[in-house]
Amino acid sequence: MSAEFVLEMKNITKRYGENTVLTDVSLSVRPGEIHALLGENGAGKSTLMNVLFGMPVIHSTGGFEGKVLIGGEETHVLSPHDAMQKGIGMVHQEFMLLPGFTVTENIKLNREITRKNPFSRFMGKNLETLDEKSMSMDARRALDSVGMNIDEYTKIHGMPVGYMQFVEIAREIDKKGVKLLVFDEPTAVLTESEAAQLIKVMRQIAESGIAIIFITHRLDEVAAAANSITILRDGKLAAVRETKNTTIIELAELMIGRKGEAVVEADDRTPPMDEIAMKIRNLYVDMAGEEVKGISFDVYKGEILGIGGLAGQGKLGIPNGIMSLYDAEGDVELFGKKVVLGDAGAVLRSGIAMVSEDRKGVGLLLDQSIEDNIVFTAMQIYGEYLKKYGPISLKDQAKVRSVAEKMIKDLDIRCFGPTQHTGTLSGGNQQKVCIARALALHPKFLFVSEPTRGIDIGAKKLVLETLVKLNREQGMTIVMVSSELQELRSVSDRIAIVSEGKLVDILSPNASDADFGLAMSGIKPSEHKEKGDGAK
């Protein structure tokens, strides 16, 4: 008698040191079903798949607790190659193809078909000749199974990304003994018609008896393709649902969920909307993995505008593009004056400052003192904190020390003094030094990108309280970009949600979990409600 489930992951717990990233998570997938795996960034999806595929990062960090069963038998997956031998494959979001090779060569890579020749009969298998005709026939069958008419001898280089995604799938289909395929955000790079074709192909694969784990953030695709759904939240199992028994609204609520009390308590107020501080129209940003595709919105003077969305959807591209760290085009005005995109110095001189999400790579000079970090950009852009002696400029040490001590006091930077090296500070205090550097420019407008990334909960609270204080007491207009929705809801007057490089909606921080979940999956809540909330 065959097993009911092709895969069972039972009570999986994974820790990295003292940090528990998965807690007692279970996942069961039947043969021939499409099982969606949902969750926000950081929910635990990738870690769970790393466990399934026996990734080195799991084994080298103490392994995991729980059991993995394939076909009803407990199994120890030692490596990705071992997973493949056991019938588990993956269609990656990041293409794993060799550009200089043909479609056939990519599909048959490491599984080439060879035939004997006079040399190999004496010298061994390594001198066998590639059986290109048989390999081509296999590739053709695999391509036909995913509806691809492309010639099997075409090289990957220069091929449209949608075609490459289907070649990835064809490669997995061609493998013998495949029982389960994991599709990791497979429609992220596809057009609408290609995505529809992919879902059709997934159904055909499932009908052949192969199970599919479908990882996606697009809830409408889950409703269209999946038979059942597992939702993770904060490294724990939030729910398991049959698609026919749920709705997109419920899935959105389960994905987001309430994550406890607000990180900080900012007073409720009517969002200030008297004067536009920044007008953004038709902004495009070419930032790898965070492209922005024609976004338009306004930021009002004196507000904290949050920008949220899943990783890789474009939210980080907005501040990085406006600050000219990446190529950008569009129209941006600050208090009615045009901002010249492409000239970082001009942007800073216009009155815009930014606290980068990459505080170690972009934001800080870790081997320099706190005081030098605070004044560095202002010295470069405005020539502040310098004494001029004819053609020679020297640092005004007294003025530098004075402003550093004031910033340390105002922002409560925990340190031994302004001469302490920034690299020796805790993450939260390093982030405060980044804020101090931005404030030393005396900006009219402040971008703050992922301000709490990589710091502990106590430091998060202090950083967010600092931003609220700057806004409430000094009237600073702030745009805060964050992957932490609850933090955005704690401090923001309004929250813009970005998906696939476009603005989906601007919501109140008090909007429902369902509205945020829908927006983060690319669906405007008001439009979805007009159509009805059924999952099917």
Image (tube, rainbow, N blue to C red):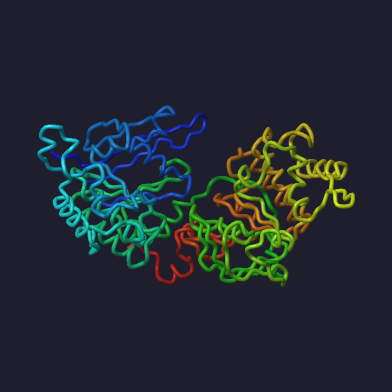
Residue at horizontal 28 percent and vertical 52 percent from the top = 34
x then y, percent, for residue 56: 39, 33
Query: Is 506 displayed left or right of 143 in the figure?
Result: right
The reply, left or right, for residue 258 in relation to residue 69 is right
In the image, residue 357 sits, relative to residue 496, either above or below, namely above
* Residue 441 drawn at (x, y percent): 76, 54
User: Looking at the picture, does residue 280 appear above or below residue 24?
Assistant: below
Q: Nearer the viewer, residue 252 or 361?
A: 361
For the view shown, which residue lies furthest in the front direction? 119
Q: Is residue 89 left or right of residue 364?
A: left
Horizontal and vertical percent position of residue 119? 13, 37
Q: Which quadrant of the rendered structure holds the C terminus? A: bottom left
Which residue is situated farthest in the top direction here? 62
Q: Quadrant of the N terminus?
A: top left
Q: In the rendered image, which quarter is residue 366 located in?
A: top right
**Which residue of the protein is positioned furthest toward the right in this rendering?**
389
The relative height of residue 301 versus residue 252 in the rendered view (above or below) is below
Q: Position of residue 345 (x, y in %)?
A: 70, 59
